[in-house]
Image: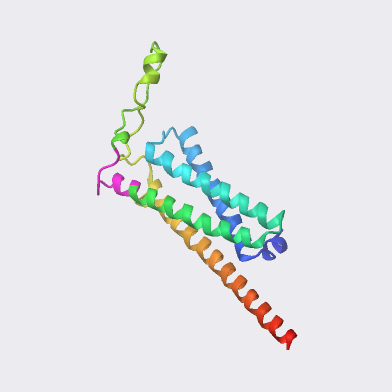
Amino acid sequence: MIARMKSLSLVESALLLAALTSAGLLAGAHAFETFGGLAPCKLCLDQREAHWAGLGVAFAGLVLAFALKARRAAAATAGACALIYVVSSGLAAYHAGVERHYWPGPKTCSGGGPVNVEGLDLGAALGAPATGPSCDVVAWEFLGVTMAGYNLLISAGLVAMCLVAAANAARDARNSVRAGEALGGELTK
């Protein structure tokens, strides 16, 4: 297993780590919700969507790299992952700022607590605006960093990793084209 990991290219390693990290963050978020009783606010759900997108694109890149041997397409997915994680970082930074009351959150994130559905008219409940925890309330933090803060740090790291992998792949592709042109030029002389 370790030998196989060492044989991966930088792009393959970055895509694998991005997929595993997004999957881990999503699993952690769902565990906090399911076992910890921490319902997600609207901004939390938006951040999850970014990681679902990152997981999907990274997985597609791995399929391109391993199953189809499409190295350049896999490198392009690393660049796409970097863009997705830029969005994730932005969402997390915005949410962290809302939690710390640096700026107001969206109007759709005012909270209202859990909904008791006993004796509730289903039609009226479906027509009413959704309620959930407020985005400006810190549900959990460790060492002074909230979940949104950790997501910001991890997503920023994923941006850097995916950008480096995509840039290295682009440089290698450019160098191989130049080497081929030079070699082709020498063969015609």
- Residue 68 visible somewhere in the drawing: yes
Find residue 71 and report its horizontal and vertical position in percent: 66, 62
User: Nearest the camera: 184 or 129?
Assistant: 184
Q: Quadrant of the N terminus?
A: bottom right
> Position of 110 compared to 24: left or right?
left
36 sits to left or right of 24: left
Q: Residue furthest bottom?
A: 189
- Residue 98 included in the magenta stretch of the image: yes
Query: Is residue 170 rendered magenta in the image?
Result: no
Residue drawn at point x = 71 percent, y = 61 percent: 4
Give 7 or 33, whichever is nearer the viewer.
7
Q: How is the image coloured?
A: rainbow
Q: Position of residue 29 (x, y in %)?
A: 48, 41
Q: Residue at x 37, y 20 (%)?
A: 127
Left or right of residue 154: residue 165: right
Say which of 170 and 7 sits in front: 170
Q: Residue furthest front?
A: 188
Query: Where does the magenta region start and end?
Result: 95-106
Image quarter for residue 139? top left
Q: Can you give x and y, in whole percent of width and height, for residue 36 in the image?
A: 45, 35
Image position of 47 with respect to 121: above or below = below
Residue 149 on image: x %, y %: 38, 51
Image quadrant for the C terminus?
A: bottom right
Quadrant in the rendering for residue 155? bottom left
At 59% from the left and 56% from the top, the residue drawn is: 15
